Amino acid sequence: MKKIILTVFAATSLLLYSTPSFAFSISLGMPMSSTPKECVGTCETDSLTGYFLGVQLPFAMGLGMDSHKLKRKGDTISIVTTMYNLYYQLPIPVINLILGLGVGSQDIEGTGAEFFEGGSANQWYTSIGFPIMALFDIHLSYRSITSNEMKIKSSGTKIKNSSTVMGAGFSFGF
């Protein structure tokens, strides 16, 4: 009985894989690494937490939200980035290739955060997904974040906090 169920499941997955006619897709990912574009002081990451959320509409366009918190070794503050994205999935068979743009903000949290002023940020990103069954895929993403207008309140000195973030996740279509 187990063999019959597995055979039917495998055959159905292959049959549905050839006809990707789902209307919506929900994607969830998480940041895996962050690399600063310009570094002052220590550049090693102590912790990186957060999520990437995306909802793809039936016409290959999608909306997303990213939120992640980065703490570097030796720092008492964390940089919190929140982005709102618009993306497009290119019509390529076999892989899911996404290109997107996002706008949002960066803020400082933690001990000493009162000395800093948050600012705006923008990003471009790409994601490549590999279907594992008809309705699921796993994907890797690359985000290039440009920080704008963050500064030290007392001196007005601007802080450059641009970085790249690599992530991984999965999506489910229905």
Image (cartoon, grey):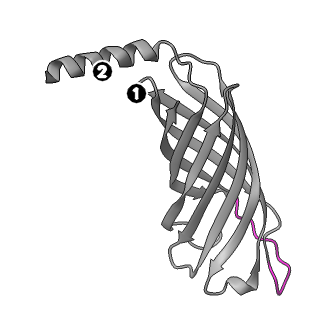
Q: Badge 2: how crowded within 10 Å, few (<14), some, or many (20+)?
A: few
Residue highlighted by disc 1: 132
Seen at 64% across and 19% down, the residue is 91
**What is the quadrant of the N terminus in the image?**
top left
Q: Mark 2 falls on what kind of element?
A: helix
Residue 109 vertical placement versus 18 (above, below): below
Boundaries of the magenta span: 152-162
- Find the residue positioned furthest to the front: 1
Q: Mark 1 falls on what kind of element?
A: loop
Left or right: where does residue 141 sit relative to residue 170?
Answer: right
The one nearer the camera, 89 or 174, is 174
Which one is in front in this view, the residue at disc 2 or the one at disc 1?
2
Q: Main secondary structure of the magenta part?
A: loop
Q: Quadrant of residue 67?
A: bottom right
Question: Which percent across, then down, holds residue 38?
Answer: 68, 61
Left or right: where does residue 12 sit relative to residue 167?
Answer: left
The one nearer the camera, 51 or 2, is 2
Question: Which percent across, then down, holds residue 126?
Answer: 63, 37
